[in-house]
Amino acid sequence: MTRALVDLKEEGSMRTGFPAAFMALTGLLLFAVPADAAIAKGATPASVEWGSGDTVYLAGRDVTVDSNVAGALTITGETVAITRDVKVGGDVWIAGRRVATEGDIKGDLSIRAQDALINGHVKGDVTFYGVHVVFGPDAWVEGNVNYFSAGPAEVDTGARIKGAMRSKVWDEATKPREPHYDGSEPYRPYTERNWSDRWPAPGYRLSWPGAIFFGLLAGIVALAAPAGAARLSEAAGAQPAFAFLVGLVWLIGTPILAVISAVTIIGLPLAFIVILLWPLGMVIGLVIAIMAIGELVAGRIGTTYDRTARVIGGIVAATLLLWIGISLPALGGFVWLAAVTFGVGALVLSVRLD
């Protein structure tokens, strides 16, 4: 145990209906954050905790978990430790510089760190991305181990790994590929050559089931808060360019704010929240775009049908249009970007109309 530890080198009417429906959607898409973020009972005093049901989120500089967690556990910090007597009932995801886990994990363990020591029981699979990983003498992994590191994993003779161990080691990247036939520079090294299929560049594809999901969310919110949907359409129709600009500022500014906040220890919890809100905004922006376009379409259907039928028809048409647009091979990324930024901007402008 001591040897393995040493091996870690360093380490809410018209005004309230739409906001209420919007917040309900937000809660469904992410998680419930307490009104007052509490200091984690099972972590160091400098840590901050959020919870949703049995799931716990921790952020801090030095985080030590020493009490049980009924569900999943997500941790970000510089140094992270899960002590020996801790039992985690779900999956564990950790991002940090130095990580040590000695507790009992009932789900999968995923670590992104410079150095990691795994010296406890993991019922599921273990995944590691970083520089150096050590399996101590008390390590017991019932699932598979997959790691991508700078060198081979150090496995103590007392460690037990029931499943298969698969690795990708950076050392292999030092061998250049053969040059192009035209005599240009060699191909990019091992990472691109062997991991391109596993780590493709982010795409802007929207599957048909995904389109149905976003359409359903947009339809539910539009029917639950018709006044809000009308304001969205009014805001988007009156100032479409400004709506796009506001959304673009959010899209670019949020990650920058997260980086600036993370510079200080006090700002680290804010950075953690901002990072979580950025992908949430992507989802909400697409939903709002469908609602705004759907409301514009519904206004042109006429009065032959009742309000509900017009809304549903507009949502279906908007969803279909966006799905087709995002699926275009060359223009899909631009359509996706325009929809998300337009949606976020329309939401901000609709709130100003209040």
Image (spheres, rainbow, N blue to C red):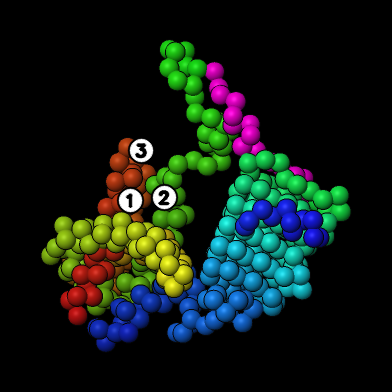
Q: In which quadrant will I find the N terminus?
A: bottom right
Marking on residue 171: none
Return the x and y of residue 58 as percentages of the image width and height.
56, 71
Return the x and y of residue 210 as percentages of the image width and height.
45, 55
Asked if residue 7 shows in the view, the reply is yes
Magenta residues (range)? 163-178
Residue marked by disc 2: 206
Look at label 3 and name its amino acid. Pro
**Which residue is at the front of the view, 62 or 120?**
62
Look at label 1 and name its amino acid. Trp
- Calculate the distance from the C-alpha at mark 2 to the C-alpha at mark 1: 9 Å
Look at label 2 and name its amino acid. Leu
Asked if residue 307 shows in the view, the reply is no
- Calculate the distance from the C-alpha at mark 3 to the C-alpha at mark 1: 12 Å
Residue marked by disc 3: 329
Dot 1 lies on which element?
A: helix
**Which mark sits nearer the N-terminus, 2 or 1?**
2
Q: Quadrant of residue 52?
A: bottom right
Q: Are marks 2 and 1 in contact (CB under 8 Å)?
A: yes
- Camera-nearest label, 2 or 1: 1
Dot 3 lies on which element?
A: loop
| 289 relative to 205, above or below | below
Marking on residue 336: 1
Q: Is the residue marked by circle 1 packed among few (<14), some (14-19), or many (20+) residues within 10 Å?
A: many
Quick check: 4 left or right of 247?
A: right
Q: Residue furthest right?
A: 158
